[in-house]
């Protein structure tokens, strides 16, 4: 386990049971996240991305596998350990602002509540957080006086009130327009740069890749591919020039290969060579390349 890794997941399995039915939500998922990294986890509904976020956040316990966060083994946690972990190590931002904030309190008071509950009130840090999310001038406003994007930025500040090491965001831009979504993602980058916090974002929005350095795709409960920002684009991406990113290929795409050599081919690749019809493939080593073909394309 590298000292740079703050999240280390290996062969993670989650099975949900309901009467006589079992649902396999995570099927041996592997993932590593470095300290100070912003990672977007993308997948369709039912892919397992939200289940993964719940596992990392200590809201649900894995059925099997290995899950270490900040050097802590979450599979060995007691209920008391989970309470301390959720208070001190991770912060949450949900898509629904009603889940993040108390409507009859002001922006300042919402950020203050977690501090009061933990006995660590810090008025100067509340003002610093409001400044970092660009809402110092709205500190005395209640939620009804704030726009959806402003509410989400206050939710982010509230999630950081107790200075967690990891910020977990579940569809944080799902309820706002494209322009506001860009502003929220700018806030994430600013917070990462200023606080050194690690941020994991779960979303179904593929356009988020224009705003983060690394995108992990999940399919059928396993990591299937990754997009990694090219080195030459790192400065420009962090300077919020996403309009250029939308028209240029700024990321390298990789298929994830697990320790046993298993991988998931992108669906469009499998369809293009007919693997979706046969269910079988021919694999050939050709120098430094591995060539995958459908059986019917073999030469006689």
Image (spheres, rainbow, N blue to C red):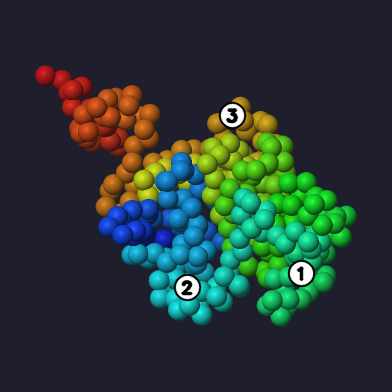
For the residues labelled 2 and 1, say whether their Cβ atoms are less than 8 Å apart. no
Where residue 198 appears, as percent x and y from the top left, is 59, 59
Circle nearer the N terminus (2, 3): 2
Q: Nearer the viewer's eye, disc 2 or disc 3? A: 2
16 or 66, nearer to the observer: 16
Identify which residue is drawn at 28% across, 36% down: 290
Secondary structure at numbered mark 1? helix
Which residue lies under the disc numbered 2? 72
Residue 7, visible in the rendered structure: no
Could you tell me how far apart the alpha carbons at marks 2 and 1 are, in whole angstroms?
28 Å
Identify which residue is drawn at 62% across, 33% down: 245
* Quarter of the rendering occupied by the C terminus: top left
Image: 115 above or below 271: below
Where residue 296 appears, as percent x and y from the top left, is 18, 23
For the residues labelled 3 and 1, say whether their Cβ atoms are less than 8 Å apart. no
- How dense is the environment of label 1, judged by Cα within 10 Å: few (below 14), some, or many (20 and up)? many
- How dense is the environment of label 2, judged by Cα within 10 Å: few (below 14), some, or many (20 and up)? some
Image: 129 above or below 46: below
Secondary structure at numbered mark 3? loop
45 or 245, nearer to the observer: 45
Circle nearer the N terminus (3, 1): 1
22 or 209, nearer to the observer: 22
Could you tell me how far apart the alpha carbons at marks 3 and 1 are, in whole angstroms?
42 Å
Residue at the extreme left? 300
The tag on residue 248 is: 3
Where residue 73 appears, as percent x and y from the top left, is 43, 72
Where residue 93 appears, as percent x and y from the top left, is 63, 57
Identify which residue is drawn at 54% across, 49% down: 202
Residue at the extreme top? 300
Which residue lies under the disc numbered 1? 112
- How dense is the environment of label 3, judged by Cα within 10 Å: few (below 14), some, or many (20 and up)? few
The tag on residue 254 is: none
């Amino acid at each position: 386990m590298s000292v740079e890794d703050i999240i280390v997941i290996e062969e993670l399995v989650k099975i949900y049971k309901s009467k006589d039915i079992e649902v396999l939500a995570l099927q041996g998922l592997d993932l590593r996240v470095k300290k100070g990294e912003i990672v977007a986890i993308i997948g369709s509904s039912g892919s397992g991305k939200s289940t993964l976020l719940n596992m990392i956040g200590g809201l649900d316990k894995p059925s099997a596998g290995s899950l270490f966060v900040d050097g802590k083994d979450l599979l060995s946690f007691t209920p008391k350990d989970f309470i301390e972990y959720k208070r001190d190590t991770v912060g949450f931002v949900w898509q629904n602002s009603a889940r993040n904030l108390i409507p009859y309190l002001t922006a300042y008071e919402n950020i203050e509540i977690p501090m009061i509950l933990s006995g660590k009130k810090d008025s100067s840090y509340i003002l610093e957080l409001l400044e970092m999310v660009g809402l110092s001038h709205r500190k005395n406003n209640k939620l009804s006086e704030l726009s959806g994007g402003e509410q989400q930025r206050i939710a982010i500040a509230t999630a950081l009130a107790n200075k967690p090491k990891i910020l977990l965001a579940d569809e944080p831009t799902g309820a706002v327009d494209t322009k506001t979504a860009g502003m929220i993602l700018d806030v994430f980058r600013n917070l990462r740069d200023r606080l050194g916090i690690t941020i994991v974002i779960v979303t179904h929005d593929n356009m988020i890749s224009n705003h983060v350095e690394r995108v992990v795709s999940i399919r059928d409960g396993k990591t299937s591919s990754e997009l990694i920002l090219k080195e030459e684009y790192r400065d420009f991406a962090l300077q919020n020039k996403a309009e250029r990113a939308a028209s240029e290929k700024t990321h390298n795409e990789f298929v994830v290969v697990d320790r046993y050599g298993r991988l998931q081919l992108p669906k469009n690749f499998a369809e293009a060579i007919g693997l979706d019809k046969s269910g079988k493939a021919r694999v050939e080593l050709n120098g430094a390349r591995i060539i995958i073909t459908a059986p019917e394309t073999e030469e006689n």
